[in-house]
Amino acid sequence: LVPILGKRSGWEEGWDKRKECRGMDYDWVSVYGSDKTSTFEVLPNCASYIQVKLKRITDGGDHDVAICEVVGTGLWDEKSQTVVWMSESDVDGLDALDSSTALYTGQLRVEGII
């Protein structure tokens, strides 16, 4: 999925990340946001989820930089097939993700994926 999700912009004309994922049997699913009223689509079974609110976009030279506020963090719940959004007290007890539990850019480069 890295070439689909990470190498091309979702804003690129004629490029649809949902459609490309579906072509590889990775369908997106609709979930409620951390506010329990908004909905959006995600890939199921990810290591974690971060819901953000766009604050502004600024010029980053050869790319745009999005400044966002984190409004929710969550984990995939296999039983209910949705994201379970956590409170700050839930997050405090969790171990940080590392290269044994999540993909990182450095690892992808070492393995020649990007």
Image (cartoon, grey):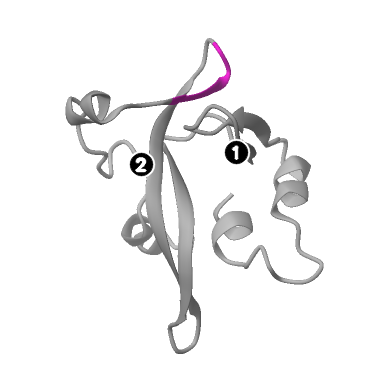
Q: Residue at x 62, y 67 (%)?
A: 8
Per the image, the residue denoted by label 1 is 42
Is 103 covered by the magenta stretch?
no
Magenta extent: 80-84
Front position in the image: 101 or 86: 86
Image coordinates for residue 108, horizontal then vertical, percent: 40, 57
Is 82 covered by the magenta stretch?
yes
Indicate the quadrant where residue 90 lies.
Answer: top left
Residue type indicated by callout 1: Val
Q: Is residue 9 left or right of residue 74?
A: right
Q: Residue at x 54, y 60 (%)?
A: 6
From the image, give the main secondary structure of the stretch colored magenta.
Answer: strand
Per the image, the residue denoted by label 2 is 102
Image coordinates for residue 36, horizontal then vertical, percent: 54, 27
Q: Residue furthest top?
A: 79
Front position in the image: 82 or 106: 82
Q: Is residue 22 left or right of residue 30?
A: right
Tag 1: Cα neighbours inside 10 Å, few (<14), some, or many (≥20)? some
Image coordinates for residue 19, horizontal then vertical, percent: 78, 48
Image coordinates for residue 80, horizontal then vertical, percent: 55, 12
* Mark 1 vs mark 2, CA separation in Å: 17 Å
Q: Is 103 located above or below residue 8 in the figure?
A: above
* Sooner in the amino-acid sequence: mark 1 or mark 2: 1
Residue type indicated by callout 2: Ala
Q: How many marks?
A: 2
Front position in the image: 64 or 54: 54
Q: Which label sits on residue 53?
A: none
Q: Secondary structure at mark 2?
A: loop
Q: Are marks 1 and 2 in contact (CB under 8 Å)?
A: no
Q: Residue at x 47, y 53 (%)?
A: 53
Q: Is 80 located above or below residue 43 in the figure?
A: above
